[in-house]
Image (spheres, rainbow, N blue to C red):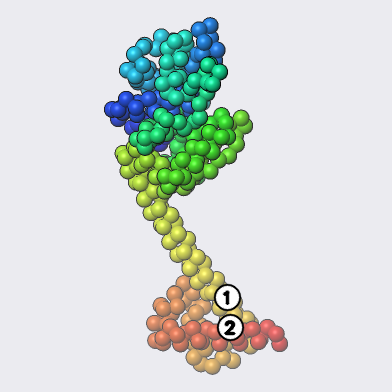
Amino acid sequence: MNFGETVKEEIFSKPLKEEHCKKAFLAGIVRGNGVLFESEDGYGLSFKIAGEKRAIAVSELMGDVFGFDIREISVAEDRLNRREIFEIIITGAEADKALFELGILKDAADGGSEVSGFFGDITKRECCFRAFIRGLFVSTGSCTVPSGDDAAKTGYHLELCFSHATTAELTSAELFRRGIKSNITRRKDSFVLYIKSAEEIKDFIAFLPAPVSVLKLTDVMIAREILNVSNRRKNCDLGNVNRQIEAQEKIIRAIETIENSRGLDALRPELKATAIARKEYADDTLSELAERLSITKSCLNHRLRKIAEIAANTKTK
């Protein structure tokens, strides 16, 4: 189960208690992927839920809130994600009742009805706004975090998918008012509100709220940071080793230049001894070589620089 599904499982594991929050939650689900259509008895409504247990839970919640049973459910297979998608369909007077009470339809000036704004009276309470966002995430949200063998290749990504730009922008603005930053992009015929910052994703999940998922995400973030620090240290250590090897090879080439042109006997005795020791103990670190010669590391560096200068002058002659 991916992390997004874990969050959704936690959402369904904690049923809402207040009637107004239950309606807001259902409104979020329907607003997320619901479809209005005309039937013989007026408006009809359909919306989709992934997973049998969740579909049953939503059907029971509809019955609890509106006092009618869901009589029409179809199922289709989502082969890509290896799961079943359940479509709940409501028609007639029951659809009208649900649509008006969920704040999706409202009375029009001409005596008919019209679609109301995305955020209306049903989300005026802060608790109801949270419930609405929970419903949106259940309906159209997803979330991935680094995990397993692909952790190095996978980033943090949370998204809510909308069919209209305006609803995506309104949701992004409402979340921003609550300190959660998001961006919007277009993907074919959809408008995607997305968050890629691990901290912002954690804030979003905490806002729902889904505290157990927040703790799991925190564990992932800590493990990822430990891995990054370890990799940086390894890279730093490797860089230092490479620089030491390059420096050693450079001084060996300088010694060989002098040896092949002037001979090491042309060097002062202390430089000759240093050159011979450097070649003979090529794998020694500077500290080890200095100790072998019974001199300080600073003195050794001075001698090696002098040898390099002599080799450079020898090349130009």
Residue carrying label 1: 250
Residue at image position (36%, 12%) is 68
Q: Quadrant of the C terminus?
A: bottom right
- Residue 148 versus residue 88: which sits nearer the camera? 88
- Residue 34 versus residue 238: which sits nearer the camera? 34
Q: Quadrant of the N terminus?
A: top left
Residue at image position (48%, 28%) is 32
* Res 308 label: 2
- Residue 25 versus residue 3: which sits nearer the camera? 25
The answer to whether residue 199 shows anywhere in this view is yes
Mark 2 surroundings within 10 Å by alpha-carbon count, few (fewer than 14), some (14 through 19), many (20 or more): many
Left or right placement of residue 211 versus residue 251 in this view: left
Mark 1 surroundings within 10 Å by alpha-carbon count, few (fewer than 14), some (14 through 19), many (20 or more): few
Estimate the x, y position of residue 134 in percent, counting from the top left: 40, 32
- Residue 168 versus residue 139: which sits nearer the camera? 168
Residue, far left = 17
Which of disc 1 and disc 2 is earlier in sequence? 1
Q: Three-letter amino acid code at disc 2?
A: Ala
Q: Three-letter amino acid code at disc 1?
A: Lys
Q: Where, by quadrant of the figure, is residue 309 drawn?
A: bottom right
The span from disc 2 to disc 1 (Cα, nearest Å) is: 8 Å
Estimate the x, y position of residue 115 in percent, counting from the top left: 52, 23
